[in-house]
Amino acid sequence: MPGVVVPGVIDAGRGGKFGVMSSPTSPLTLEDRIQLADRMDQIIESSDRGWTVPLMEGYFMALATAPDAVIPDEWMEEAIPADVLEPDVTEALTKDVLRLYSDVLAAFADPTSEWLPLYAYTDEFDTVHTALGFAHGMEAHAGELWDAYCTDRPKIVKPILKTASIDLSDEGINKRTFANAEKELFASIYQVYVDLAPVRGQTIVTAPITAEATPGRNEPCPCGSGKKYKNCHGRG
């Protein structure tokens, strides 16, 4: 996949402190992602440092979208505050975060992937972290390209920027604030990925994800089962 590190495990002997991707690993299950999210939330609460898993996912989507490869050294120390953790805790977290990184890159590289961001299964507030992570990653690794794209395609980036601007400390926000974010955010991010494929030297022969293709977690599953999406085809 031009422009990103090939999904897989980490070869610690290459590509900096955290290495580069080599052979494939098993993806994280939804339960794995939720457990990783809980661990990171606890670390952030106690140290006021580190990234939430939804923010990581947004950032990794940006790395998949950006034109140049980015090695984990460039973001890992910001994501995991190793200096306030025991070495064994840092090692375990690093392995899982690198697996998550691989999963996101693999999902974007595979047009048939059914992977969805964690916010599709958890809390609508997590959409804000995902949007912030994507915007942060694009600004850090494709700043001029991102600025130009935002100017040229304002309707595409609107769900991303609007969601990223939500103040989670505002007592006035409620579920209605996120009415469109759950359906539109991932579709918008993927559209950016598709649009910037030529910059990465790619040709993507697939229709981009649409808002309709990614229903809200509490909406009826489009398969017609009568169940909510999160309890049917949205499970993973």
Image (cartoon, rainbow, N blue to C red):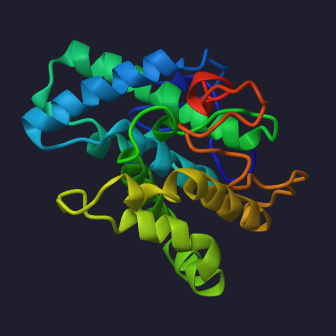
Q: Identify the residue at horizontal 68%, vertical 37% (top origin).
A: 107
Q: Quadrant of the N terminus?
A: top right
In the figure, 89 relative to 209: above or below? above
Give percent across and percent down for residue 226.
69, 27
Looking at the rendered image, the quarter that the C terminus falls into is: top right
Q: Is residue 187 visible?
A: yes
Which of the 4 image quarters holds residue 224? top right
Residue 115, located in which quarter of the rendered image?
top right
Q: Residue furthest right?
A: 205
**Closer to us: 71 or 144:** 144
Which residue occupies the foreground of this view, 87 or 111? 111
At 48% from the left edge and 35% from the top edge, which residue is drawn?
118
In this view, the residue farthest toward the bottom is 151
Where residue 92 appears, as percent x and y from the top left, is 33, 16
Name the spot of residue 57 as percent of width and height, x first.
Answer: 48, 42
Depth check, front residue: 92 or 130: 130
Q: Is residue 236 visible?
A: no
Residue lying at 43% horizontally and 56% vertically, measured from the top left: 178
Position in image of residue 199 (x %, y %) = 73, 67
